[in-house]
Image (cartoon, grey):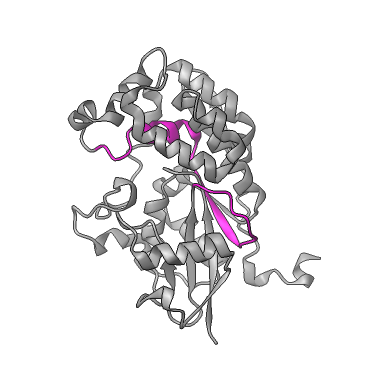
Amino acid sequence: MQAYRVFMLNSFSRSGETMLLRALAAHPMIRVAHDLNARNSRLEQALVGRIRTEGAITIGADDPVLGDDRPPEGGVIVVKNAVWTHAFPCPGFVLARNPFSIVTSLAAVEVGAEEEAERAPLGRLVRRLRGRDFPWSDAAIDLREKIERWSRGIDARMAPFANRTDPVSAIAVLWARKMLEAHGRGGPILRYETFVHDPEPPLRGLLAWLGLPWDDAVLSAHERYPADAIGHGGIRLGEPIHAGSQDKYKAMPLAAFHAIYAMTAGVMRLYGYAAAPERNLIVEDFDDRFDPPPRDRTPDAAA
């Protein structure tokens, strides 16, 4: 019986997963398991549950959990893992984004225009992050609940600290824990900062690693959606890939920048990130581990 191989996208929330999943979903041989649209269907939830709780690395082509969205023979399933530590072996790749931008993005998640951000709970957290201190506030309850849930999935032993410290520290330590585990799982690494500036080279490398042919549709995936379509995490699916949020982290207080660096520096180096004074991120060359692709990993090739 034909079966689809499962590949895991290992990341941390707000790393650009929706943009990458949108591109991959445009490829005719890729089924994105979940977290592309604003809400996941029951079948999508069931598919992710099969992978997350049972450790499935293949899904039969006739499995009802796939619904009507079945790739052709030789196709693959890509499942995003941004908020849990997977308990099973699973081939996959990594999408990394620097922790300074992660904190900034999470502070503004699900908030639209700037004037709306000033009125919304998470927008008030943005203002708090721009101040001298960055404690929890009652207005940040949505983010607090997310961090509580993520800490249970990533490392429950970190929950007592993550749930009681300030939001900057909580996000930073969870990012470091999750991305250290993601790096240790192996597989190629895409960096958000490279992907948004020039998506074609990393997409070509990833498709080759997955053993799939190139398809130009991945570069124009936004054209499949109305201009106002909203996907997972409030991402506008009808907009092309862009680097518009690349430097937003520079608005954070210097104290927050220093705190994030202190808690993540060792893991940042694994992904080629370094920090210079005055809130400047440095993205250096590093081993992205794109060679060899999984189908070429024979005993002879590894010897």
**Relative side of 79 to 126, left or right:** right
Viewer-closest of 2 and 138: 138
158, above or below 222, in the image: above
On the question of residue 301 being in view, the answer is yes
**Relative side of 226 to 32, left or right:** left
On the question of residue 247 being in view, the answer is no
233, above or below 77, in the image: above
Quarter holding the N terminus is bottom right
Q: Quadrant of residue 15?
A: top left
Task: Identify the residue shown where x is 30% and y is 48%.
Answer: 235
Viewer-closest of 17 and 297: 17
Magenta segment includes 114: no
200, above or below 11, in the image: below
Task: Identify the residue shown where x is 37% and y is 75%.
Answer: 69
Question: Which residue is at the far bottom?
Answer: 1
Residue 223: give x, y in percent of width and height. 25, 61
Quarter holding the C terminus is bottom right
Magenta segment includes 96: yes
Query: What's the magenta region?
Result: 83-111
Residue 295: give x, y in percent of width and height. 63, 72
